Image (cartoon, coloured by chain):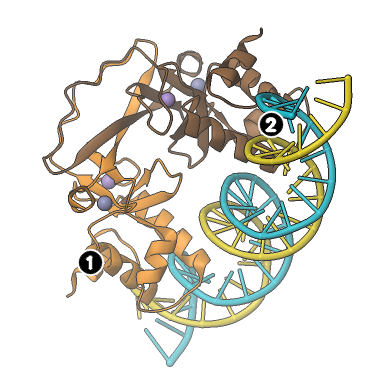
Chain colours: A brown, B orange, C cyan, D yellow
Amino acid sequence: MEQAKKILKSHNLKITPTRIAILNVFLTEKNALSASQIKKNLIIEFDRITLYRTLLTFETKGIIHKISSPDGIVRYAICTDNCPAEQHNEKHLHFYCYKCGKIYCEEDTDISGIQIKSGFYIESIQIIAEGLCKDCYKN
Amino acid sequence: MEQAKKILKSHNLKITPTRIAILNVFLTEKNALSASQIKKNLIIEFDRITLYRTLLTFETKGIIHKISSPDGIVRYAICTDNCPAEQHNEKHLHFYCYKCGKIYCEEDTDISGIQIKSGFYIESIQIIAEGLCKDCYKN
DNA sequence: AATCTAATGCAACAATATTGCATTTGCAAA
DNA sequence: TTTGCAAATGCAATATTGTTGCATTAGATT
Ligand SMILES: [Mn+2]
Ligand SMILES: [Mn+2]
Ligand SMILES: [Zn+2]
Ligand SMILES: [Zn+2]
């Protein structure tokens, strides 16, 4: 069975052409993607609203995680940390290139050592570094 | 002279009722605010477009800084670090409470010491911790 | 008070997102 | 294989957020 179907099944989601198509985009593209970027990369066509609803479903199930970038566009990337439903584990850094607009998930960045004053309960930490990516820095 | 006027003058901005009203919202409310939240707190009424343009002006001048939160809504908070125009100094952490939706600027959190793999050029880092704030944690 | 530049208001437009409801479809049980 | 049901989808309508061009107004300086 192809990977997309496996993921859907393991999260108790019905297997539909739409969901498989969306998941395949995430499995192919490593960078974080906005709704419109996902739409461009899809093989089949379907309603924009279905895309929004599917992204929400995937996020709730812990399949993808949301990243809000400095440009104000919400993007999504596949979860590599095997996140449980309703609670994401993302502890990695996201890098936003202000030239090409790509967002990279930097899995292997150590972000321990960040403290916050008592009274607040931290569930997850999202870090967005802004600058120039490898490709854009060269040119 | 009231504080709002002082701030405008020190940044070479014309003193207008609109700008004073917006600045006063920021000076009163400590948490980060979205455009619509600001609009609600204004004493006088004016065009929505003027608000957007004023926020951009303030951000460019280093009076306020933009925060992109996990819910995808862009918020703004006043700069306490005396940021120069076109380049913000914000090195502090932002805390997002997923229950009440407030964003707190945590000024006294040390976020130095974050490393990223070579090849990438980092200009700024934004950290958003997500969880429950003091008030919401109690209840 | 006159002048000039900057700020504002208005209109139009665009992108993004949400909700209700009718229809279709996946899937499990019969 | 067929049937039945809950879930997924499509469509329409509406809301929110943000941008741009242009005419008008108003702040600051002389
Ligand atoms: Mn995740
Ligand atoms: Mn700042
Ligand atoms: Zn780049
Ligand atoms: Zn709270």
Label 1 sits on a secondary structure element that is helix
Mark pair 2, 1: CA separation:
42 Å
For the point 24% across and 49% down, the residue is: B104
Q: Is residue B129 left or right of residue A9?
A: left
Do tags 2 and 1 sit on the same chain?
no
- Residue A47 seen in the current view: no
At which x and y percent is residue A21? 69, 23
Crowdedness near tag 2: few (<14), some (14–19) or many (≥20) residues, C-alpha within 10 Å:
some
Name the one closer to the observer, B59 or B42: B42
Residue type highlighted by circle 2 = Lys
Crowdedness near tag 1: few (<14), some (14–19) or many (≥20) residues, C-alpha within 10 Å:
few
Residue ID for mark 2: A39
Residue that extends furthest to the top in the rendered view of this protein: A1
Location of residue A30 by image quarter: top right
For the point 30% across and 31% down, the residue is: A124
At which x and y percent is residue B99? 33, 49
- Residue B99 seen in the current view: yes
Q: Nearer the viewer, mark 2 or mark 1?
A: 2
Label 2 sits on a secondary structure element that is helix
Q: Quadrant of the N terminus of chain B?
A: bottom left
The chain letter under disc 1 is: B
For the point 29% across and 46% down, the residue is: B97
For the point 18% across and 42% down, the residue is: A120
Residue ID for mark 1: B28
